[in-house]
Image (cartoon, rainbow, N blue to C red):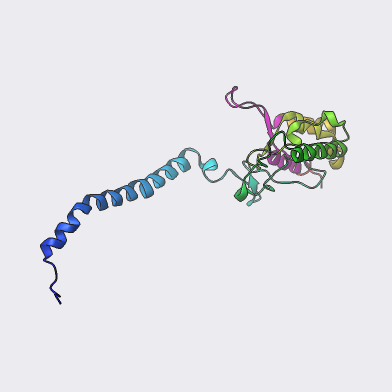
C-alpha cells in the first residue's frame, strides 16, 4: 500500500488555477456585498434621512405608524383607508390576485360598496371605487380626495366638529400629482387622522 504524500509542488499546481477565482469571489463579496450596501445606505440616510428609516411618524416620542403603510381605523371619528388583502400587514404585502371577471371579487366589491354607503349615509353609486377595491400591495396609505370628502360628514358628526373645518383639513392634506404629472391627487389617511387628533389640543378642548 502506497502511503507516500504527493509532492508539495503538485499540490500548489492543483490550487494555482483556482486562485484568481477565489480572489475575485472575495473581492466581489467585499465590494458588492458589503461596501456597496454600506455606501448606498449611507447616501440614502444622508440625502433622505426620513425616508431611509421607513418614513416613520412619531407622536410624543412614540412611533405611531409610517406614512408609507396603511393601517385600519375602527372608530367613526377617523377616516378609513382602502381595503387590504394583506390585512394591512407590511410583512405580507399582496393584492387579492383576482381578475375583474372573478365572481367572488365582484360579490365582495358589491358587498363593500353597500357597507360603505350605509356607513357614510350616501347612495351606493356615490361610493368611490378606491374605498371598495384593494390595492396591489395591500398597504396603500392614500385614498383619493373624493374618498376622503365622502367621509367628512361622518367624521365631523362623530367629533362634534363643523363640516367646513374637516373639509378644510382634507384640503390641506390633499397632495397633488407628483411633479404635477405622475400619479393623481391623494390624501394620506394616517397623517389626516393624526391632524384630526391634534385639533382638540390645538383648540384647548378635551
In the picture, residue 201 is in which quadrant?
A: top right
- Whether residue 25 appears in magenta in the rendering, the answer is no
Number of marks drawn: 0
Residue farthest toward the front in the current orientation of the protein: 1
Could you tell me if residue 58 is visible in this image? Answer: no
Residue located at (76% from left, 46% from top):
73
Q: Is residue 34 left or right of residue 50?
A: left
Residue located at (83% from left, 28% from top):
126
| x and y, in percent, of residue 152 in the image | 81, 34
> Which residue is more in the foreground, 98 or 113?
98
- Whether residue 184 appears in magenta in the rendering, the answer is yes
Q: Is residue 70 left or right of residue 104?
A: left
**Position of 122 relative to 66 (above/below):** above
The stretch in magenta equals: 172-199
Residue located at (85% from left, 32% from top):
124
Residue farthest toward the top in the current orientation of the protein: 181
> Which residue is more in the foreground, 99 or 64?
99
| x and y, in percent, of residue 170 in the image | 74, 32
**Position of 175 relative to 79 (above/below):** above
| x and y, in percent, of residue 106 in the image | 77, 36
| x and y, in percent, of residue 141 in the image | 66, 39
Could you tell me if residue 183 is visible in this image? Answer: yes
- Placement of the N terminus among the 4 image quadrants: bottom left
In the picture, residue 120 is in which quadrant?
A: top right
> Which residue is more in the foreground, 85 or 37?
85
Amino acid at each position: 500500500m502506497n502511503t507516500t504524500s504527493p509532492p508539495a509542488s503538485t499540490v500548489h499546481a492543483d490550487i494555482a488555477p483556482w486562485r484568481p477565482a477565489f480572489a475575485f469571489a472575495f473581492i466581489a463579496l467585499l465590494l458588492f456585498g458589503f461596501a456597496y450596501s454600506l455606501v448606498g445606505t449611507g447616501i440614502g440616510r444622508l440625502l433622505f434621512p426620513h425616508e431611509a428609516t421607513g418614513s416613520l411618524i412619531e407622536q410624543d416620542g412614540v412611533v405611531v405608524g409610517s406614512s408609507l403603510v396603511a393601517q385600519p381605523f375602527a372608530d367613526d371619528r377617523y377616516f378609513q383607508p382602502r381595503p387590504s388583502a394583506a390585512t394591512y400587514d407590511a410583512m405580507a404585502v399582496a393584492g387579492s390576485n383576482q381578475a375583474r371577471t372573478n365572481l367572488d371579487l365582484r360579490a365582495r366589491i358589491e358587498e363593500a360598496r353597500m357597507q360603505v354607503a350605509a356607513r357614510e349615509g350616501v347612495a351606493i353609486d356615490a361610493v368611490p371605487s378606491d374605498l371598495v377595491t384593494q390595492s396591489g400591495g395591500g398597504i396603500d396609505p392614500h385614498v383619493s380626495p373624493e374618498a376622503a370628502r365622502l367621509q367628512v360628514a361622518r367624521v365631523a358628526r362623530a367629533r362634534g366638529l363643523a363640516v367646513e373645518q374637516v373639509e378644510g383639513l382634507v384640503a390641506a392634506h390633499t397632495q397633488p400629482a407628483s411633479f404635477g404629472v405622475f400619479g393623481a391627487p391623494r390624501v394620506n389617511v394616517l397623517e389626516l387622522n393624526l391632524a384630526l387628533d391634534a385639533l382638540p389640543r390645538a383648540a384647548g378642548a378635551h
